[in-house]
Amino acid sequence: MTKVNNWLKSAQIRLWPQCCQLCGDGPLDFDSVLCDGCLNDMPWNTHCCPVCALPLHHDAICGRCLRKPPAYHRALATFSYRDPISHIVHGLKFGQRLYYGRFLGEQLAETVLRAEHLIMPDVLIPMPLHRKRMIERGYNQAHEIARPVARRLELPIALDIVARQRETAEQSRLNALQRCRNLKDAFCVTGSASGLHVAIVDDVMTTGATVGELARVLVVAGVRRIDVWLGARAPLAR
Ligand SMILES: [Zn+2]
Ligand SMILES: [Zn+2]
């Protein structure tokens, strides 16, 4: 019985932590992960490039998008990837804290609903994870974020359009040239995507190389329009 209770307790903590995960305040309302104070203090991505969502002090298109427009149409990101969002994303990816996926997804749905000139996509595509990493981790963090977005916006999630066919090293550990080589043939289209408007959902976009490569592959497969919906967007490295 104790074993069952312990299991229930740990499942409950993973799904609903009960007190604020940043300051420990509580108890929280059912389904909340952070208290109102911590939520207000989050690094919201209020001013950013309207194309790639790069955090800026203004809302004009960034130099990089002007020089070389990305393969996707438009990126939206709820947060700038700074503390404590980096801590939250890390907890989701490496600490089994699935409630952070729900938190990021619910906030992302609000970001999408607030966006001007929004055209709803036909489907959501969570950034695919290689099968081996999926087995190691037990879940795909991008799918965990996409789930609440899909529920709130009443959109389907497509898991059969594109797959990660090559195991790639963590992009964050590589330099620009290595990142590019690392992504060669990383994705393959496995289902029909022709004529679709899709939104790629991911936890964080740093340089945009991974999302850019996925978008490129989807364009080749005949996708009509690609948007990118992100939990967070990294500012330029200083
Ligand atoms: Zn708090
Ligand atoms: Zn940009």
Image (tube, rainbow, N blue to C red):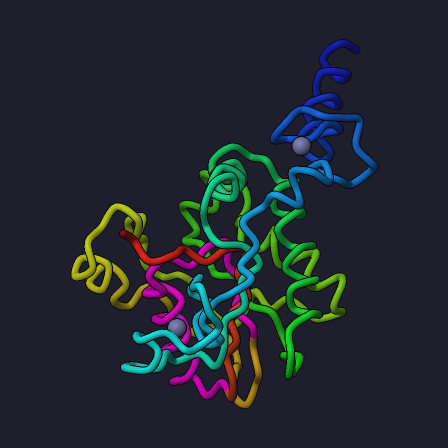
Q: Residue at x 56, y 35 (%)?
A: 96
Q: Residue furthest top?
A: 2
Observer-nearest of 67 and 70: 67
Q: Indicate whether residue 201 is drawn in magenta.
A: yes
Image quadrant containing the N terminus? top right
Q: Residue at x 61, y 31 (%)?
A: 22
Observer-nearest of 23 and 232: 23
Observer-nearest of 179 and 157: 179
Observer able to see residue 188: no
Q: Quadrant of residue 150?
A: bottom right
Q: Residue furthest left?
A: 177
Q: Position of residue 65 (x, y in %)?
A: 35, 78
Q: Indicate whether residue 120 is drawn in magenta.
A: no
Magenta segment: 199-223
Observer-nearest of 145 and 69: 69
Q: Residue at x 44, y 61 (%)?
A: 55
Quadrant holding ligand 2? bottom left
Q: Position of residue 230 (x, y in %)?
A: 53, 61
Q: Position of residue 137 (x, y in %)?
A: 48, 39
Q: Residue furthest front?
A: 57
Q: Is residue 116 above or below residue 108?
A: below
Specify whether 151 is left or right of 231. right
Observer able to see residue 115: yes
